[in-house]
Image (spheres, grey):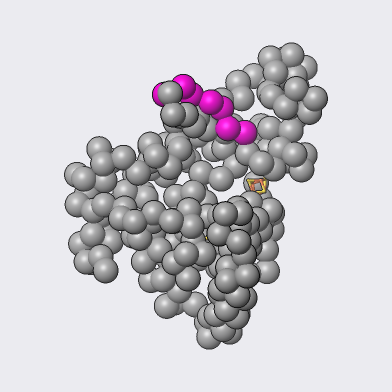
Amino acid sequence: MYTQEEILGYKIYLEIIEKRMLNKYFENQKPYLCCKKGCSYCCEKGEFPTTEIEMQYLYYGFMFLSDDVKKNIHEKITKLKELKKQHSVEKELLYECPFLINNACCLYEYRPIICRTHGLMFFLTDKNGNLHKKIPYCVNLGLNYANVYDTEQKIITTEKWQQSGIKVEPNAFNISRKILKSKDLTEPLGFIFGEDKRMIDWL
Ligand code: SF4
Ligand code: SF4
């Protein structure tokens, strides 16, 4: 369990990454983004990696929900636990987030960092330290970055970008969870992220 001071440090951290990084990046990439209220594909299928402090903060937000919504979430969690029991451990398990209610996040203010970066293109570092651009999955649904995506080569091409007439480049950012969870960002604020696992494993 985290102390109130640690949770406060985490809240300040969220404000910092949103104000100094994420809000600016979303604004910068606006011509490529289709994110809007009611669009929830990114919450409908995933693993939703979540750390201990992020999970505690979600549960903190949960306390303020109406009884009906809480009941709905409990039912979803029961189904997810059943799904997990029946699923082979070796296979990837993709599921709908239990906090998605009527196509919207009922804990939006309390959502984990993975959800705050959803929609942007970002860099992933492989085992050898090489950077790879990761395009949001919903490009395949004709959503984010689809206006500059070459569906045959499965990449964003300069040609497509030039054809689009959009001035700002389709950029990837250093916002992988590994980067955002770095101690350099969290230690000065007096908290650590703690254990990191799939959301379903916390339920
Ligand atoms: S990331 Fe994609 S699926 Fe998620 S809200 Fe944005 S457009 Fe919709
Ligand atoms: S916590 Fe909210 S934003 Fe994140 S996956 Fe669940 S419903 Fe979506």
**52 and 58: which is toward the camera:** 52
| Residue 105 horizontal/vertical position (percent) | 57, 63
Q: Magenta residues, as a range?
A: 129-135
Kindly indicate the quadrant of the structure image that contains residue 121.
Answer: top right
Question: Would residue 133 be counted in the magenta stretch?
Answer: yes
Left or right, 113 with reference to 136: left
Question: Would residue 102 be counted in the magenta stretch?
Answer: no
Left or right, 111 with reference to 97: left
Q: Residue at x 45, y 74 (%)?
A: 62
Quadrant that contains the N terminus? bottom left
**114 and 63: which is toward the camera:** 114
| Residue 83 horizontal/vertical position (percent) | 62, 70
Q: Residue at x 26, y 52 (%)?
A: 192
| Residue 26 horizontal/vertical position (percent) | 54, 38
**47 and 37: which is toward the camera:** 47
Q: Residue at x 66, y 41 (%)?
A: 137
Left or right, 2 with reference to 108: left
